[in-house]
Amino acid sequence: MQLKRPPSALQLGLMAASCALLSHTARAQTVDSAEQPFELDSALLYYKENPGRVQTIEPVVSLKKDFGDQRILGGTFTVDSLSGATPNGALPSRKPQTFASPSSTSLVPQAGKKTTLYAIAPGNLPQDPHFNEQRVAGDADWSQPMGLDNNLSFGGHVSTEHDFDSFATHADYSRDFNEKNTTLSAGLSEEYDQIHAHGGNPVPGSDYELYEHEGGQTKTVSGALIGVTQIMARNWLMDLNYSYDHSQGYLTDPYRILSVLDALGNVTGYRYENRPDSRARQDLYWVNKVAFGPTVLDVSYRRGKDSWGIGSDTAEAHLRIDLGHGVYLEPHLRWYHQSAADFYDLYLSAATAAPQFMSADPRLAAFIGTTAGLKLGVTIGRYGEVSLRLEEYQQRPSDQSSALPQLQGLNLNPNLTATIAQLSWGLQF
Amino acid sequence: MRTAAEIAAAAPHAPDFQIAVRGDDLTAVCFTAMASPCEVLLDAADSREVGELARAAAHEAWRIERKFSRYRGDSVISEINRSAGRPVVVDQETAALIDYAAQCHALSEGRFDVTAGVLRRCWRFDGSDRVPDEAAVARLVPLIGFERLQWRPPQIIVPPGMEIDFGGFGKEYAVDRVLAILCTRFLGAVLVNFGGDLASNRAPVQAPWQVGVERPDTDREARLLLEFSRGGLATSGDTHRFLQRNGRRYSHILDVRTGWPVPEVPRSVTVAAASCVEAGMLATFAMLNGRAAEDFLEAQRARYWSLR
């Protein structure tokens, strides 16, 4: 075409719009590309506890493919490596203490057996310095609508470590009501785990000196969830969920022991921990998401209660502040409190017979955990995003000392501080 | 050898394409997409290369049809039209097309509107005399208006009752897309012709493309023979799509402000421009000007052929 005369303003506008349309989509599409893009999210998580304790670097890759009509396939793949020192459950003592690493098959060196010992200096918290764990995990989920108002999703999860394998499946159903302003959902899940500790699983509750081990064990976790999501106003969404989980089988931590102390606080021996073989847990979770223009506030509260006597409360808030130009800042605060399990204690008394169930695992103690963090996100292009999250977690157990003379001045269950840094990037192609 | 139209008629929806050699160095690829006979001419003779190009061309046209057809329940357009006021997040290509619709709406001062398709509920341009009653048309007019959509890329909110479609430029878009795809794989001359809307990268070495634009009329056969080398060419007309009652002809070009046909539109307007979408939009804008269609095209200094 030859335009001898200059084009009009309208034709210039149309030319520009047409060029933009064609150049834009020329870059985006190739002949055989599927109709919907792939979404790829990757993240690198760095987690580090107080000096000398556990640290990990965890890469996560997740891929999502929309096959149109809200039929979505998602998958996640994670590889992580945990290394460092981890408390074994025994208390600090005025005297040196010696323990065997879990990979040992005997406490004393003998032919045909393996013994790896570690010594703990007086006053120090006994921690196994050889802790090293590699984990590979993957999951896949399929979600699709059924009719106009129903949605069905199901998926599976597999993870493997050299002493623990886990397999899980879930199915969820949701139904929209009230012109999609209300969604009711229900789900069922089932998990099967195999626990086969290094050198066999210790016999729960047995005397550490006897070093008795048995074969691998299993546990199952069955869960059910019901929930309602309600759009309260144009900019306010509320979600209320109730879940019930029942665990059955080997729920004991094979690497945890307890100190056995006399009336003065001297160590007379150690015992392997022993937990009940069933646990029922209920959770009520309430979330509100409110948008103030581009700024979004997310506030939630969770109340948990289980048959071991642990009650917990979590209050959490995220505020996503849009700074314009595709940049956002997201401060995050979380407060968590739990009461101790009925069978939790710092130590066992040598004067009385050992109880049926016992554990000194700090995760079953009463404590308050607080998290404060900040995330900075930058949108790249139309769909890509890079974000950096920095958080600090503080765990303060309520029970950290004892009146026993030999334990005076010792911190029996120290605070835990962990630093978390996560770099994430997402893109569509 | 059969023509594209014959092939299309023989297998209206077959996901199939035909390849035929024409003359010395010209190969034609024919298939059906968007209810139109589609033809791609390539100045190449290597059959293996042509097979790959033919497949690429047909698949791109079918992909666009599948993705944007308002007649398919699984298209992006149907998903948007079912959303009834809920936000729908669209992909990059759909976003670019909605942006284009927004720009054309603005450039035409609101006369070109992708939400006007609701008028099909009462207007059926089948050559009959079934003109809808005024009340039925008046009830639909409030459901039209691109400005009532909330378009915040990549999210669109279409209010309940309203709908959108890309019928106003979808086929032209497919023509340009197919040409662009072929040009990334083939250095020779290409002509893409989907039911009379066409685009080319350049003319073959020997001579310009000879293009016959079909402008059949109820009274006479008016075939426009053009020499065409590069750019886009598109035709807007009401040759088969009109109603007639009491001697009055009702064109399918509707005025979105009233819901009634624009009076005194040309039977057909063919416009040449840099791309097929641009040519098609200029032709549509011209038709929306009714009696002033030619004046409009003169003012745009466009190269055009009109038939009244």
Image (spheres, rainbow, N blue to C red):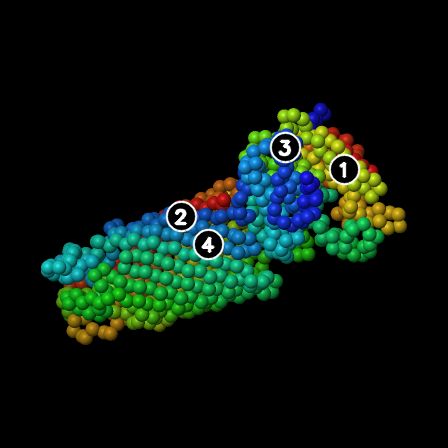
Q: What whole-number distance in Å separates the C-alpha atoms at marks 4 and 1?
A: 49 Å
Same chain, labels 3 and 2:
no
Write down the chain letter for disc 2: A
Taking the spot 44% from the left edge, 67% from the top edge, the residue there is: A188
Which element is circle 2 on? strand
With B19 as the anchor, is B124 left or right in this view? right
Same chain, labels 2 and 4:
yes
Write down the chain letter for disc 3: B
Amino acid identity at mark 3: Leu
Write down the chain letter for disc 4: A
Q: Which residue is mark 4?
A: A74
Is residue B231 depicted above or below A423 in this figure?
above
Taking the spot 35% from the left edge, 57% from the top edge, the residue there is: A159
Q: Which mark is residue B284?
A: none
Q: What whole-number distance in Å separates the C-alpha atoms at marks 3 and 1?
A: 29 Å
Write down the chain letter for disc 1: B
Q: Nearer the viewer, mark 2 or mark 4?
A: 4
With A216 as the anchor, is A109 left or right in this view? left
